[in-house]
Amino acid sequence: MARSDMSDLEWEFIKAVLPNKSRGVKRVDDRRVINGIFYVLRTGIPWADLPGEYGPPTTVYNRFNRWSYAGHWDRIMEAIADAHNVDTVMVDGTSIRAHHAATTLKKRPAPVLGSFARRIRNKDSCTYKSGRPADPV
């Protein structure tokens, strides 16, 4: 067990609010998968780089997605908030770093004709394609 994995007390609380699937193939150990989900979210690594101790990355990723769409994470957070008698839950994002690609828009090459290419008139009205009124001719 890694130092960042859930303690037994935390696991007992979360286990009580997890969905129980009683039919079909037996699920992979929920505690191991949830620890893997927390590891990926905490470190920011790609799902494919998840250490093997947490199970197959596709299993961890699929469980995270399915539970997100089904609203299970919201129910877990509500149960935690109710257990601590809080009305508001806040997440501190000050230490989250944006990906370097998110800093600027992708630069597009300039059109061959420059601003002239944007002045193509719409045949049906006296406006440009952008909707700006045309200059009188």
Image (spheres, rainbow, N blue to C red):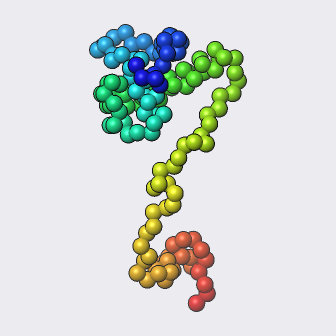
Left or right of 48: which side holds 98?
Answer: right
> Do we see residue 22 in this rendering?
yes
| Residue 83 lies in quadrant | top right
If the image is split into quadrants, where does the N terminus sit? top left
Q: Is residue 62 visible?
A: no
Q: Position of residue 23 (x, y in %)?
A: 33, 11
Q: Residue 76 placed where, x, y %?
A: 54, 20
- Quadrant of the frame with the C terminus: bottom right
Question: Seen in the image, is 93 located left or right of residue 22?
Answer: right
Q: Is 14 in front, or is 125?
A: 14
Name which quarter of the figure residue 82 lies in.
Answer: top right
x and y, in percent, of residue 130 in the image: 54, 71
Q: At x 69% / y 27%, what residue is drawn?
A: 88
Q: Nearer the viewer, residue 9 or 77?
A: 9
Instruction: Tell me where residue 96 appears, x and y as whole percent.
Output: 55, 43
In this view of the protein, which residue sits in the foreground, 70 or 127?
Answer: 70
In the picture shown, does residue 115 fall above or below 102? below
Name the residue: 43% across, 77% down.
Answer: 111
Q: Decide which of 68, 96 is in the foreground and name it.
A: 96
**Residue at the farthest front position:** 3
Residue drawn at the location 45% of the way across and 39% of the way down: 44
Location of residue 79 by image quarter: top right
In the depicted structure, whether residue 102 falls above or below residue 71? below
Q: Identify the residue at the far bottom of this view.
A: 137
Horizontally, is 77 left or right of 86 in the view? left
- Relative vertical location of residue 35 with respect to residue 21 in this rendering, above or below: below
- The total of numbered circles placed on residues is 0
